[in-house]
Image: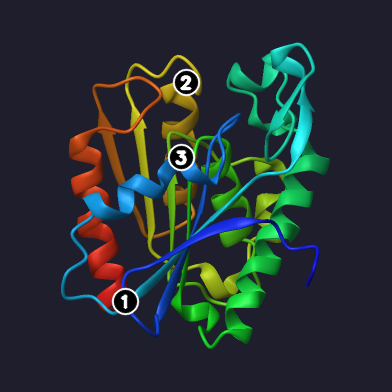
């Protein structure tokens, strides 16, 4: 497993019983959401291993081909509500890399049913892409300020094992980066298929706010205690 993504790990206690794999957004790295661990009130829950992987370096079209950490390439048309044109090759490569991290947790004693996938923006897209297509049941999926990529192939690729997996989605109503309509459209699409989805929106742009952190904490506590 030497080709596993590099990642930052934080444990809330000895001998963690659950894992949260949390993917950052475009141009950031695994450090981006490390501070949020201390802001989540996870008292009373089993010990958790938070894993914050670093996305690979790649050229990003929308940023004039500049090489940065990215889960997949982004073109201007991708942010005009057309998630069907997302960089399929990059999305699927990142999906495979996150699946490898899930599998590694199993070797460390944490079954897939006790793994949560989480992510912001591009990272959230990969959380949805991977989690809903993963062949074994996961504990939960959290997707912040993002959308479901490759929706055209979803109906034939969705994994029955995660049809009932709890999903948390949240979005800023003034998001200028990933338009609110993209996130809300994915929410409508998934709930229409019967997925258990908790949706929140906030009067913010492409970011995370205090109210959202509170709601994330509430959702995580429920999932971790389930």
Q: Which residue is mark 2?
A: 179
Circle 2/circle 3 CB separation < 8 Å: no
Measured along the vertical axis of the image, is residue 225 above or below residue 84? below
| Rendered location of residue 45, percent (x, y) | 23, 75
Q: Which mark is residue 32?
A: 3
Residue at 22% x, 65% y: name it: 42
Q: Which residue is mark 1?
A: 13
Tell me: 195 left or right of 35.
right
- Sequence-wise, which precedes: disc 1 or disc 2? 1
Tell me: 196 left or right of 25.
left
Tell me: 215 left or right of 93.
left
Measured along the vertical axis of the image, is residue 203 above or below residue 2? above
Q: Which mark is residue 4?
A: none
The label nearer to you, 2 versus 3, is 3
- Sequence-wise, which precedes: disc 1 or disc 3? 1
Measured Cα–Cα span from mark 1 to mark 3 = 21 Å
Q: Quadrant of residue 44?
A: bottom left
Is label 2 in a helix, a strand or a loop? loop
Residue at 23% x, 49% y: name it: 39
The label nearer to you, 1 versus 2, is 1
Q: Residues within 10 Å of mark 1 (few under 14, many from 20)?
A: few
Residue at 61% x, 48% y: name it: 126
Is label 1 in a helix, a strand or a loop? loop
| Rendered location of residue 37, percent (x, y) | 31, 54
Residue at 41% x, 44% y: name it: 33
Tell me: 116 left or right of 161.
left
Measured along the vertical axis of the image, is residue 132 above or below residue 212? below
Q: Quadrant of residue 171?
A: top left
Q: Nearer the viewer, residue 116 or 137?
A: 116
């Amino acid at each position: 497993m030497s080709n596993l993504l590099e990642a930052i790990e934080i444990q809330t206690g000895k001998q963690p019983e659950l894992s949260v794999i949390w993917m950052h957004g475009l141009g950031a790295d695994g450090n981006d959401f490390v501070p949020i661990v201390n802001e989540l009130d996870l008292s009373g829950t089993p010990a958790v291993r938070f894993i914050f992987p670093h996305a690979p370096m790649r050229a990003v079209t929308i940023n004039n081909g500049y090489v940065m950490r990215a889960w997949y390439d982004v073109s201007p048309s991708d942010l005009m509500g057309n998630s069907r044109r997302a960089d399929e090759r990059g999305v699927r490569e990142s999906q495979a890399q996150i699946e490898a991290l899930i599998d590694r947790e199993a070797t460390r004693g944490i079954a897939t049913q006790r793994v949560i996938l989480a992510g912001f923006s591009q990272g959230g897209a990969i959380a949805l892409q991977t989690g809903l297509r993963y062949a074994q049941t996961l504990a939960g999926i959290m997707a912040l300020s993002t959308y479901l990529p490759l929706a055209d192939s979803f109906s034939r690729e969705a994994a029955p094992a995660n049809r009932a997996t709890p999903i948390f989605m949240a979005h800023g109503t003034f998001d200028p980066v990933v338009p609110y309509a993209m996130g809300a459209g994915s929410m409508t699409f998934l709930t229409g298929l019967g997925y258990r989805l908790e949706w929140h929106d906030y009067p913010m742009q492409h970011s995370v706010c205090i109210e959202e952190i509170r709601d994330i904490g509430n959702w995580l506590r429920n999932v971790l205690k389930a």
